[in-house]
Image (cartoon, helix red, strand yellow):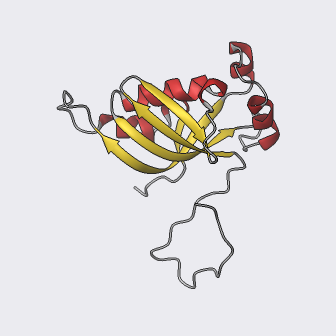
């Protein structure tokens, strides 16, 4: 969903805000031991961000899911998202490990649109803890209050 202009709420209770992350909106499809990334118009982004797809597959540990988020590259000094760094990553169809290390990308997850545990999984949702901690390139955009 795209943001639209509107009136600010008069009372903050019951409202949730998402940070403006200066990245590229993406949907992730996670299955078995793999993952795919798609842009808003449906273009495949997986080959451009292999570290993100690998992190998703690891973090969800066999769960099938569809996630909505934003691919972000952070400035190493300030920790602030920088779109110009993301543009450098988007321009390379199959980035080498040196580029991935120099300009790492991560997926900031806004919504879990679909989730299904594998039939063999009798544990609780251990992947939720890994996702919530921002392990391996997957970062929640909004954290729950303690």
Q: Is residue 50 above or below residue 80?
A: above
Quadrant in the picture for the N terminus? bottom right
Q: Image check: 70 left or right of 93?
A: left
Q: Residue at x 43, y 55 (%)?
A: 144
User: Residue 50 occupies which quadrant of the picture?
Assistant: top right
Q: Is residue 12 above or below residue 17?
A: below
Quadrant in the picture for the C terminus? bottom left
Q: Position of residue 13 (x, y in %)?
A: 47, 77
Q: Position of residue 83 (x, y in %)?
A: 78, 43
Q: Nearer the viewer, residue 54 or 104?
A: 54
Q: Image check: 59 left or right of 6?
A: left
Q: Image check: 100 left or right of 28?
A: right
Q: Is residue 74 above or below residue 92?
A: below
Q: Residue at x 34, y 43 (%)?
A: 115
Q: Position of residue 47 (x, y in %)?
A: 63, 24
Q: Residue at x 21, y 30 (%)?
A: 121
Evaluate whether residue 136 shows in this view. Answer: no
């Amino acid at each position: 969903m795209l943001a639209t202009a509107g009136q600010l709420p008069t009372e903050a209770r019951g409202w949730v805000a998402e940070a403006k992350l200066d990245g590229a909106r993406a949907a992730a499809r996670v299955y078995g031991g793999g993952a795919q990334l798609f842009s808003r118009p449906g273009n495949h982004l997986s080959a451009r961000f292999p570290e993100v797809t690998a992190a998703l597959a690891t973090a969800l540990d066999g769960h099938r899911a569809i996630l909505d988020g934003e691919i972000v590259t952070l400035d190493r000094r300030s920790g602030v998202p920088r779109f110009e760094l993301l543009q450098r990553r988007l321009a390379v169809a199959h980035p080498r490990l040196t580029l991935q290390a120099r300009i790492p990308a991560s997926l900031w997850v806004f919504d879990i649109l679909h989730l299904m545990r594998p039939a063999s999984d009798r544990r609780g949702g251990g992947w939720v803890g890994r996702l919530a901690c921002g392990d391996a390139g997957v970062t929640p955009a909004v954290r729950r209050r303690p």
